């Protein structure tokens, strides 16, 4: 029997319960493997392209506020991971398409050998319109992908 050991685990989070379950599962695996964990939140800039009035947000206040919110959220998750006994953890925020960043860009930059994700972070309507990021990552990633349910 071959025993798979992981060195660098990527756990993308989006504030959903599924992502937080994936984080818990990822910490368990990291502790068993003495692995490093990267917690990642991808901020999709498409959501900021048009304001409620139909005008483009020229000064970037919404983007800046969103980044501040994500930074606070990630800091809380790092504290939670530390409380669970894992100290080798880093938090990251990136702007762009969650699909491409999670499936390829980030793992290549950080040599992640496992991605652990929640089954879905989207509501059913968004899933129908844009598809599941998790589904895309499981098809395209060059490393192992685990879906936590």
Image (cartoon, rainbow, N blue to C red):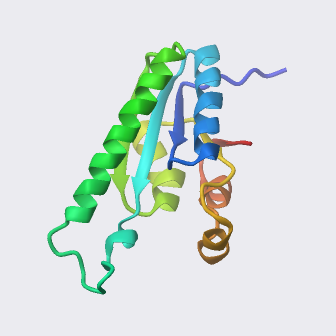
Q: Please give the name of the residue rendered at 59% of the width and 43% of the height, measured from the top-left corner.
A: 19
- Tell me residue 109's x, y (percent): 40, 43
Quadrant position of the N terminus in the picture: top right
Q: Nearer the viewer, residue 59 or 113?
A: 59
Could you tell me if residue 143 is visible in this image?
no
Judged from this view, the residue extending furthest toward the front is: 53
Q: As drawn, which residue projects farthest toward the bottom?
A: 54
Q: Position of residue 12 (x, y in %)?
A: 52, 44
Residue at the limit of the structure toward the left, as seen here: 59
- Residue 77, relative to residue 131: is it above or below? above
In front: 88, or 2?
88
Q: Name the residue nearer the viewer: 59 or 145.
A: 59
Marker count (numbered): 0
Residue 143 place in picture, x, y as percent: 61, 43
**Residue 9 visible from this viewpoint:** yes
Q: Residue at x 44, y 43 (%)?
A: 40
Residue 134 drawn above or below residue 36: below
Task: Say above or below: 58 vs 97.
Answer: below
Say left or right for 54 vs 103. left
In the image, 70: left or right of 56?
right
Tell me if residue 36 comes above or below residue 51 in the rendering: above
Q: Quadrant of residue 63?
A: bottom left
């Amino acid at each position: 029997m071959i025993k798979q050991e992981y060195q660098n685990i990527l756990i993308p989070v989006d504030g959903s319960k599924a992502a937080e379950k994936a984080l818990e599962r990822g910490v368990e695996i990291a502790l068993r493997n003495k692995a490093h964990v990267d917690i990642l939140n991808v901020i999709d800039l498409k959501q900021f392209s048009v304001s409620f009035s139909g005008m483009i947000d020229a000064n970037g206040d919404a983007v800046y506020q969103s980044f501040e919110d994500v930074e606070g959220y990630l800091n809380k998750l790092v504290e939670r991971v530390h409380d669970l006994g894992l100290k080798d953890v880093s938090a990251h925020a990136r702007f762009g398409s969650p699909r491409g960043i999670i499936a390829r860009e980030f793992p290549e930059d950080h040599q992640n050998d496992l991605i652990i994700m929640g089954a879905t972070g989207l509501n059913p309507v968004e899933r129908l319109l844009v598809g599941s990021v998790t589904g895309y990552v499981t098809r395209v990633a060059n490393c192992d992908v685990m879906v936590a349910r």
